[in-house]
Image: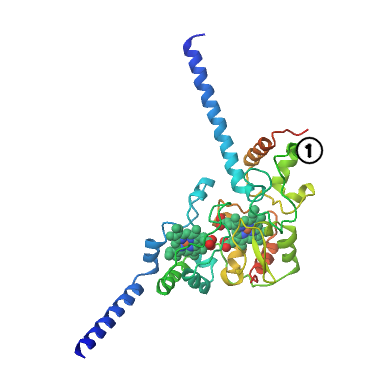
Amino acid sequence: MRLLAVTVSLGAALLVMTTANSYAAGGDAIFKKSCASCHYTDGPAKEKTIADQLAKKGPELFYAGSKFQKAWLAAWLQNPKPIRPMKYNSLTEKNKGDHPKSSAGDAAALTDFLMGLTSPEVKAGVIKPAESPQAKAIFNKKMPCTGCHEFSLKGELHGGKSGPSLVGVSKRLNPDWIYAYLANIKVFKPVRDMPDFSSALSPKEMENVAAYLATFE
Amino acid sequence: MSRFVIIATMVFGLALSAAGSAQAADAKQMFDFYCAQCHGVNGDGKGVNVGKDFATDPRNFTIAADMEKRSDEDIRGVIKDGGPSISKSPLMPPWGATLSAAEVDGLLAHIRQLCKCKAK
């Protein structure tokens, strides 16, 4: 009986210690240890050449807090399903879906850390999710967006595979970031295989397209 | 001609051809990064984006008979301003805000190498 009591309290003490431990480590410390080999978090963007971009093992995260929705990020880090149909920086290999998984505790700490990394280029609270005939025409017909991006239509997958999938953008991306990205793409990604549309679309058109993408299931 | 001049000429020639191939490598790298998404690494129009939904086949650059019909000016224009600038599909994006004039020239030269052809 006594032995049992000792064992139980020892076990409980251990449990408290280990959980306390993983909560104690801040998101930035976990990030340095487990994530910084593939992602950088100190802006501005570092890439100058195609070779610089191809040398990256994962997307830059220095504006993660402006780009992602918090709830999505916390869930994705624990269960990271592919975002890009193809492997990062590859046009031939499929994305194997082998992103490192984080525990619930680590994911919460990492999310707090990443959501703190915001960009002054993104004005908050301007773009509200909305469909419009103009945005639909641009996305589906007038511009080549669907050539490179997957999207869902009545539950069926359509579109190209070289860009990140736009399925589920309504839960993943911040609408204000989508607008900033279209309007000022070089600040976020100076070297990328998506064209700069700032001369092809007016600011109003980009606002409408951003609002439209923000409705994507 | 002294032996020195011959050797110097050879070295200079080697340096020149090395510079030439470095430039070609850059154009190939740009092609693989920007264009191969749709036109394929071999320029045959079979890029990863070309699936059931792709309404227009991307141009196959290896068919000289088709590519001879395009002037260099047309090719530069369609790279910069997109398909609609020569009444072709909007699936060909406008790259003018992304690429410099020199980069567009490099891609044009690479495309002419793929078709092994000139404008007729």
Residue density around tag 1, few if under 14, some if 14–19, many if 20 or more, within 10 Å: few
Residue type indicated by callout 1: Lys
Q: Quadrant of residue A183?
A: bottom right
- Tell me which chain the residue with mark 1 is part of: B
Q: Secondary structure at mark 1?
A: loop
Q: Residue furthest left?
A: A2
> Image height check: is A93 above or below B41?
below
A27 with respect to A214 (left or right): left
Q: Is residue A136 visible?
A: yes
Q: Quadrant of residue A101?
A: bottom left
- Quarter of the image with the C terminus of chain B is top right
Residue occupying image coordinates x 62% and y 57%: A161
* Residue that carries the numbered disc 1 in the rendered image: B69
Residue occupying image coordinates x 75% and y 56%: B55
A160 with respect to A44 (left or right): right
Decide which of A216, B116 is in the foreground and name it. B116
Position in image of residue B15 (x %, y %): 51, 26
A29 with respect to B13 (left or right): left
Residue occupying image coordinates x 76% and y 36%: B68
Position in image of residue A98 (x %, y %): 48, 62
